[in-house]
Amino acid sequence: MNAPFTMTIDGRAVTSSQRLSVTDPATGQVFAEVPDCSSEQLDAAVASARRAAPGWAATPLVERRAVLGAIAGTLMTHKDALGALLVQEQGKPLARAVEEVMTAAYWCAEIAKLEPGTHVLADTAETLVEVRRVPIGVVGAIVPWNFPIALAFFKIAPALLAGNTVVLKPSPFTPLTTLRFAELLRDAIPPGVLNTVSGGDALGPWMSSHPGLDKISFTGSTATGRRVMESAAPTLKRLTLELGGNDAAIVMPDVDVDALAPVLFWGAFANSAQFCLAIKRLYVHEAVYDKLSAALVKLAAATRVGRGTDEGVELGPVQNRPQFERLKGLLDDCRRQGQRIIAGGDVPAGAGFFFPPTLVDNPPEDSRIVQEEPFGPILPLLKFTDVDDAIARANASPYGLGASVWCRDEALALRIAHRLQAGTVWVNEIHTITPMKPMAGHKQSGLGVEQGLEGLLEYTMPQTVSMTRRKAA
Ligand code: NAD
């Protein structure tokens, strides 16, 4: 896995004289470099994808499914090596990194079972009306750094199954594993069908404004999502935007606190809380607030934070320096406002971006730690008395990605769930994301849907064919 990293354009290795360096978040040191794609190289990738598009669209569904199966097989064959590389650039614990590669393989295998289908509206002696689902053309896929591999395949699998070709761009913070899997897949995918380019801050805007791309599927922050939408407007690209979240969890007084505490803890802190759908505001009924916060404090103290390759490490470093600095700024703000930090809060000195799981005790609703998406391991615990008030506070956010309700009374739990403004609401479970469950961001958490048949259809356009049947003269 130490060979130089290359982009994949038209099925071939492409490098660049301009280089981009990649930092290991556990050491803060640069340890690898990748090509920094020029605008001419992006043009070549888009041109290759356009050339490949008609042939791929005409390829029978059964053959496209077989290609997804081959991709899944290749990922599984190389899961350990890809996982090890992912740890180095992303920071997460090795077991979680290998799991992420396996998730990507599973997604390809499961999405391949879907069928875009043709909807027949009328089929009579006089008329035939059918709504077909045709591919959009060339999809630009733009991916963030928190789950670089899983999130890439959330896009690649449905885009390819639906008959589109793809130009894929990883985050400049985590390009290595993406370039590597694309190299490994060169034999499994026809040239031009999946092109992979790596680059700095200019590359994303070049893609979102590129006249040769028909759709952008973007996962990242809401601020960047707005910019993508703006630069995609002149060419009226189709868009799927999976953006930020500030997910609320509502804990009712009838829960079993001891059993629930670890579930909530990992629902908030998994992947060092760099998770769009992490619990980011934990609303706890006053009857169980003290007991639950004590249990969470214990769990935070017992959690092993360290290098992703070290035995027994449960949380790796924060992925990059700007994010690490931002989190320290948020923590400083909590302290300046006199908020009580009841766990964590001591950020170790040193070159790595290590940040302990940190809990803030009932900060005011208008504080930054409640209103902003931290996207890192600081969680505000918020006390409530009246569930209507908790629901109103949960909904008082520009975001609407996910939410969860924790309550033994199922009927009450569902009534609460139905009042929450979020694309996914979990009840007595969390993060049970599957390829078949549609995932949509409400409000400023996104546009469109990923996963499930609805997600697949976002990579198609409806084409209505309406025919009058005449008797032969
Ligand atoms: P980001 O918005 O900074 O970057 C995401 C990607 O967009 C990167 O590949 C980046 O290079 C590229 N990019 C940056 N500027 C661009 C521009 N002007 N035009 C086109 N592309 C551009 O996000 P991030 O910091 O990498 O990721 C964290 C954010 O992503 C969080 O807000 C998180 O909630 C969100 N996220 C959302 C989901 C979801 O499914 N809703 C999943 C994961 C992460």
Image: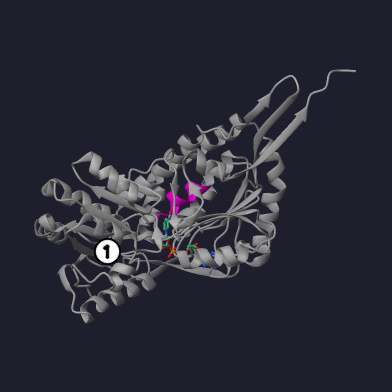
Viewer-proximal residue, 311 or 167? 167
Drawn side of residue 80 relative to residue 379, left or right: right
Q: Position of residue 24 (x, y in %)?
A: 37, 65
Q: Residue at x 62, y 31 (%)?
A: 118
Give the image quarter of residue 133: top right
Category of crowding for the residue at label 1, using alpha-carbon neighbours closer than 10 angstroms: few (below 14), some (14–19), many (at least 20): many
- 455 above or below 368? above
Which percent across, then down, holds residue 245? 38, 59
State whether residue 311 appears in this view: no
Secondary structure at badge 1 equals: loop
Q: In the image as oriented, which residue stretches furthest toward the bottom? A: 336
Q: Write down the residue under mark 1.
A: 377
Is 291 on the left-hand or right-hand side of 95?
left
- The mark tally for this picture is 1
Q: Quadrant of residue 250?
A: bottom left
Residue 312 vertical placement versus 164 (above, below): below
Residue 410 % position (x, y):
23, 39
Q: Main secondary structure of the magenta part?
A: helix
Judge left or right: residue 156 versus residue 337. Answer: right
Q: Which residues are magenta?
A: 147-155
Identity, as a three-letter code, of the amino acid under mark 1: Pro
